[in-house]
Image: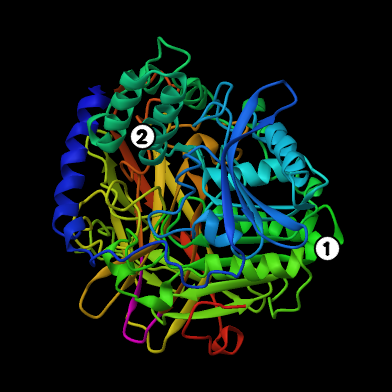
Amino acid sequence: MKSLRSAARLSAIVASTALSGLAFAPAALAAPVAWPSSAGSGSCPVSKAVDVPATMRDGTVLRADVYTPRTSGKVPVLLMRTQYGKEAAQVQPSRFQSPAWFASHCYIVVVQDIRGQGKSGGTFYEYRYDRDDGYDTVQWAAALPGADGQVAMYGSSYVGATQWLAATATPPALKAIIPSNTGDDYYDGWSYEDGAFRLAFIEPWILETIASSAAANRGDKALAKSLFADGKNPSIWLAFTPYGAFPPLHPDKPEVAPYFYDTVAHPARDSFWEAFQVRTHYDRVKVPVLAFDGWYDSFLNGAVNNFNGMRASGGSAAARANQRLVIGPWEHIGWGRPDAVVSPRLKDIGPVADSPVNELTVRFLDHVLKGQANGFADGPRVDYFTMGENRWHSATSFPIAGTHYVTWYLGSEGRANSSMGDGGLTTARPRGAAADRFVYDPANPVPSLGGHSCCSWTSGPQGQFDQSAIEQRPDILVYTSAPLVEAMNVTGPITVDLFATTDAKDTDFTAKLLDVGPDGRAINLNNGIIRAAYRESLSHPTPIVPGQVYEYHIKVWPTSNLFKAGHRIRLEISSSDYPQFAPNPNTGEPLATARTVVTAHQTIWHDDTHRSAVILPVLPAAVAGAGIDHPPAD
């Protein structure tokens, strides 16, 4: 057996080496421009009051900055509840316009520090208080001087979570939410993904932001400084195991980050996670939703699930009908504006990829809260950006009605290992050898190179990159189609049906879809993972029998990409993606206490009995339409 700590240190070196040859240093990005700008400001003069108190039902006082427009009548309220500092208001890097900018459109804008953060009282614990505090704050904001009793909410990431949790409490004054880059489930698609721990997101995020700022709120400046520093350079700590004894979050001090240790102590979807659920409470949400997300965001799947969940089960007919989702070629905080931090290939798409979040937000608010017939397109509607074509399209559903699902089978002569191997993808039933084999060593996991993670490509594995540098590893099976005779539009969620055997007590299998150009560059579109014990249920994991063939269904997250004629479709199969996901030690031990690793010998089957395949959502040109060459404006 080997130590996972020393093992992951080795793989971090591998990952760093791979990235250094492919990524541009931050200094090579375009020169920053001023943000926020005054362009598009409204007509109302604005005044600001700071640290305005609101008392929650248990007596805790939360504080907000309130931006009030000078108007002759009462106006609606736009509310942000944030753990990232009410003064910052999620303006940088090139995200939302300033609160004063929104207030100038004749809205009262309230930006509140949530419990235990910033200037607010109480003790912070992620998700736990945001449903009740959200309800109480919405009702308080609706009664502010000059307010007309209507409240909408906005913000990104955790600030999107504060919106959904408040909405599931059904406060009467809440009339709309505008969540960006946020999930539907704080277990799957947030802390875990199909049983695998989302290491590169969770540990740095907690260190640099929420634990650090909560320590500052408690007055522990020294701890806040050290947590922030560890979060800025997480590579020092990502290799540490066991996770249940993670040193920089001080397991001996329960006030520092108890939610982290609870997260790793609950690796299945159990009652701990059910207490924070959104996905099971859509019937309580009775308001229209305008949501934004990106193809490379850590919460893309959650945004799609929220859209579909509200369409099916929203708490009112108006809510079910008025759901709108905008998906761009974005990462978690990289929204395409000139000074946003975006991985280089996505950055190069140009202004057509800019997010319309601010302009559409004002149109939506004016339409829903002020009753203006301003051309805003009601739902159900999905605006989505097709990469490769670099145009925007719209549909009334996602997946899109009229999609053809095409099965591409894996095949080889038994040597699909690496991009130099003989792995193929074909729509005909596979021929040749029945299986491919590789060794998964948790001491040397496959490095993450881009993907759907959080929060910036300069500090974590997200975005779009050429995968050629890592595809020469023998522990990656590579299956590639012949060059396409004509273009193919792949838009929607992707499924990999994988028949596999392992000699380990537990293991992972990963899948990645790529677009391979005539020059050989292999560009990642999206990826997925499955932890073997969670193959049947995320709530009730079941062990596997070493040596037995199982069918795994790997959910490769959605994409929209035009494979041009002459390009090839590629699927990578492996068992690790580090540090995006914590390496499976293959021992079957609990996540929180596992200290050692063993090597696993993996077999992927592709014969008449075990037809391993990837199912692609192909969109006919007549269904996709011509699209537009600018972000949606109405």
- Say which residue appears at 17% left-offset and 46% top-offset: 16
Q: Mark 1 and mark 2: span between their CA atoms?
A: 40 Å
The x, y position of residue 330, in whole percent, is 42, 63
| Furthest residue toward right | 317
Q: Magenta segment range?
A: 563-570
Q: Measuring 35% from the left and 40% from the top, which residue is drawn there?
A: 200
Residue 460: horizontal and vertical position, in percent? Answer: 31, 47
Query: Disc 1 marks which residue?
Result: 318
The disc at residue 208 is 2
Q: Position of residue 56 (x, y in %)?
A: 71, 28
Relative to residue 366, is residue 456 depicted above or below? above
- Any magenta on residue 194? no
Instruction: Tell me which numbered mark, 1 or 2, is placed earlier along the sequence.
Output: 2
Tell me, yes or no, whether the highlighted magenta stretch contains residue 566: yes
Would residue 402 be seen by someone viewing this image from the given angle? yes
Q: Quadrant of the N terminus?
A: top left
